[in-house]
């Protein structure tokens, strides 16, 4: 999912963060930041190794040992 936010940074500290559609009234001169958020990235990394195999549309764990 692509996410766009208006952000204001002071050195490495985030001081303001607002959705583009709800621009804050503080008028900090925020910059638009766009990034891709994948809430399933850890799951994909975990499921991506050979311990799981997809058979007939069902993901099954392959037992080792």
Image (cartoon, helix red, strand yellow):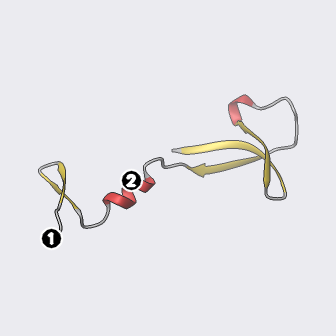
SS at mark 2?
A: helix
Residue 65, compared with residue 33, is above or below; it is below
Residue annotated with mark 1: 65
Whole-angstrom CA distance, mark 2 to mark 1, is: 23 Å
Question: Percent x, y for residue 54?
Answer: 18, 55
Seen at 31% across and 58% down, the residue is: 47
10 on left or right of 44: right
Question: Percent x, y for residue 7?
Answer: 76, 45
Residue annotated with mark 2: 43
Question: Percent x, y for residue 17?
Answer: 74, 41
Quadrant of image for the C terminus: bottom left
Q: Residue furthest front?
A: 65
Q: Residues within 10 Å of mark 2 (few under 14, many from 20)?
A: few
Q: Residue furthest bottom?
A: 65
Seen at 65% across and 43% down, the residue is: 4
11 on left or right of 22: right
**In the figure, residue 11 lies in which quadrant?**
bottom right
């Amino acid at each position: 999912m692509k996410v766009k936010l208006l952000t204001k940074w002071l050195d490495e500290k985030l001081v303001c963060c607002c959705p583009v559609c709800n621009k804050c009234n503080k008028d900090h001169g925020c910059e638009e930041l766009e990034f891709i958020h994948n809430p399933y990235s850890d799951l994909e990394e975990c499921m991506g190794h050979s311990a799981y195999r997809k058979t007939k549309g069902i993901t099954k764990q392959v037992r080792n040992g």
